[in-house]
Amino acid sequence: MVSERINSIKQALPEGVRLVAVSKYHPASLIQEAYDGGQRIFGESHVQELVGKYEALPKDIEWHFIGHLQTNKVKYIAPFISLIHAVDSEHLLKEIDKQAKRCQRTIPVLLEVRVAQEETKYGFDPNELLLFMESGKWKQYTNVSIVGLMCMATNTDDKALIASEFEQAHQLFLQIKAQWTECSWGMSNDYMIAIQYGSTMVRIGSLIFGERTYN
Ligand SMILES: *Cc1c(COP(=O)(O)O)cnc(C)c1O
């Protein structure tokens, strides 16, 4: 079941767009099922849950941390995390750099930009993000590699609004002439819109695994 849903989503994705199967709140057995069907990238948003799953499941899984990450928890995932999607402050970037150094590795990250209309606490404001990149301050964090941008659109049925938000993020991505390759946008409800606006990574949970019991 799970693998069939994954395959049908993958068939609808343009070449070059990767699927992050968002497995938060779902048991390791379902992840194993998806893994057996060939899926290797999984997204989680709670540190403790992720660490437990990391320990229980095959070691060639590419774990992505997609949620809001608290600074004091970076150390638990630093040894193994493949990509941190939602870096929303320099403070967090600095801590990831510090923990990456301890593990003698470089951790790939995305910066989260706040484009949604709805009230949200997280993400760089677009202008703040431009200034931060222009300042070159990020260069001192030598054990993180910023590889792109992440955003979440407003949770709405208004497709035009969602499209305008992804477009804003994509324009920002193009404007920042860094060597970035990744645009992480699109979830179960809006990934078909996201792929029209430069997404290279869609983060899909409920469409694959069903509704989560709590969120
Ligand atoms: C939960 C979550 C998703 C997946 O949401 P679905 O609507 O279940 O596809 C994607 N991105 C983030 C940041 C999430 O927290």
Image: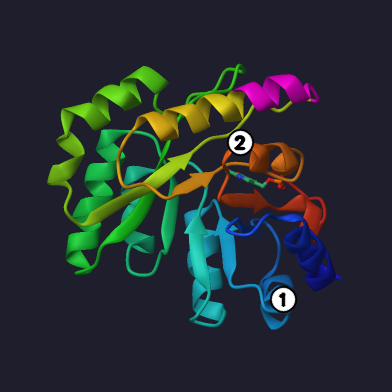
Q: Is residue 160 magenta?
A: yes
In percent of width and height, residue 211 lies at 81, 50
Residue 212 in view in this figure: no
Ligand 1, seen in the image, is in the quarter at top right
Residue drawn 36% across and 62% down?
Answer: 76
Residue drawn 53% across and 75% down?
Answer: 61
54 up-or-down from 78: above or below: below
Q: Which mark is residue 149?
A: none
- The stretch in magenta equals 157-164
Residue topped by disc 2: 197
Residue drawn 58% across and 27% down?
Answer: 167
User: Between 137 and 55, which is closer to the camera in this rendering?
Assistant: 137
Give the structural element (helix, strand or loop) at label 2.
helix
Amino acid type at mark 1: Ser
Q: Nearer the viewer, mark 1 or mark 2?
A: 2
In percent of width and height, residue 147 lies at 36, 50
Q: Is residue 133 magenta?
A: no
Residue 105 in view in this figure: yes
Q: In which quarter of the view is residue 89 placed?
A: top left
Residue drawn 71% across and 28% down?
Answer: 155
Label 2: how many Cα within 10 Å (few below 14, some 14–19, many 20+): many
| In this rendering, position of residue 90 left or right of residue 139 | right
| First in sequence: mark 1 vs mark 2 | 1
Q: Main secondary structure of the magenta part?
A: helix
Give the structural element (helix, strand or loop) at label 1.
helix
Residue topped by disc 1: 29
Amino acid type at mark 2: Tyr
